[in-house]
Image: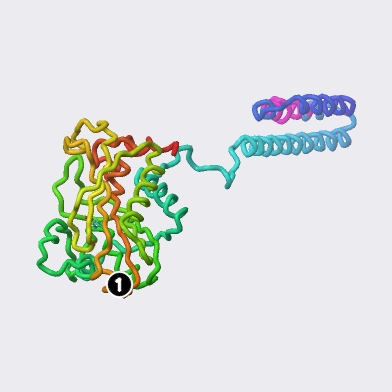
Amino acid sequence: MQKKIEELKLSFKASLAEATSAEALEALRVEYLGKKGHVSALMQELRFAEDKKTAGQLINTLKTEVEEAISEATEALRKAEIEAKVRGAKKYNPTLRTSEELGSYHPITLAAREVEEVFISMGFTIENYSEIVDDYHCFEALNIPKHHPARDMQDTYYLDNGQLLKTHTSAAQNYIMKKYGAPLRAIFPGRCFRNESIDACHENTFFQLEGMMIDENISISNLIYFMKTMLSEVFKRDVKVRLRPGFFPFVEPGFELDINCAICGGEGCPSCKNSGWLELCPCGMIHPNVLKEGGIDTEKYTGFAFGLGLTRLAMMKYGVKDIRDFNSGSLKALSQFKSN
Ligand code: PHE
């Protein structure tokens, strides 16, 4: 009997080593501890054994050993399964990008940066100014008193407190003159608003980039030189320009600087109102009243100012036919600028 028990122990050990799944372990448990299992069979035999006492103890030990071994093996198997799952799972990596889909810069931002770079290289600073301004900065300080007909061109959106959404970046001129005094070289891009009927070339929300240079002996030739340098750098092509007289109460003399339409090559299209030319950059010599209002000594200093149509420039540069694309939020249109 004792020999038989020893043999069973050995065969159990061998089978246990081979049982590598939960099912196999359960089958082994049934084989040894089940109603018709080896241990029960031994108990039956025990009745007829001579060495009842020793054999009985041995059977009990075998029983506990089998029970413990199987539950240990089951537990080990469960742990191994969990570890395998953890190992197989994707680990958290804080340096990984959450998405492959990157955004892109807005074409107006890209155009502004190009112009800014050119002016930075010529010693200009870049200024910032708010979008909500008061009547004084937007009009009165610019030689546009109340009821002046020039205001009709720049109807805008008014707030209850009398402030308004700025109609042009010139609204920052007085503030910047007072901030720095002369001599002065500054550009200031900004979002502007006008109460406009919207079509392919008019928007109620658009961008301008204003520039001012004030120093001794500044003349129209300086103005033309800076405009030409900037445009040839930005367009990287031979840009045809034409100067026409233009009226703005804050410059004297005032000009309209047009460039030939890059979209139709000068033949005429909706973007250039079929004229082949696009008004891109109104400009002129700063009116003495405006300089005085900004605290600049007009005996000593003169200066020029220009108001580049940044939205228009982006249309020209990137061949955007419809101004409405810029504010549409359409990713189809805007994501094309990804590679820039
Ligand atoms: N502020 C003018 C406009 O928006 C443009 C301009 C700027 C004209 C500077 C002359 C000098 O129409």
Three-letter code, disc 1 = Thr
Q: Is residue 36 magenta?
A: yes
Residue 248 point in image, percent of width and height:
19, 59
Compared across the picture, whether 307 is left or right of 122 comes to left
The colour scheme used to paint the residues is rainbow
Please tell me whether mark 1 sits on a helix, a strand or a loop: loop
User: In which quadrant of the rendered image does the N terminus lie?
Assistant: top right
- Classify 10 Å Cα crowding around label 1: few (below 14), some (14-19), many (20 and above): some
Question: Is the CB of mark 1 within 8 Å of ligand 1?
Answer: no
Residue that badge 1 annotates: 298
279 up-or-down from 210: above or below: above
Q: Which x, y percent locates residue 206?
A: 26, 50
Q: Position of residue 338 (x, y in %)?
A: 42, 38
Which residues are the magenta region?
A: 27-42
Task: Check the image and report above or below for 52 versus 153.
Answer: above
Q: Reply yes or no: does residue 54 show up in magenta.
A: no
Q: Is residue 305 left or right of residue 140?
A: right
Q: Give the residue displayed 40% in from the left and 62% down from the top.
A: 185
- The quarter of the image that holds ligand 1 is bottom left
Residue at (77, 34) in percent of width and height? 66
Q: How many marks?
A: 1
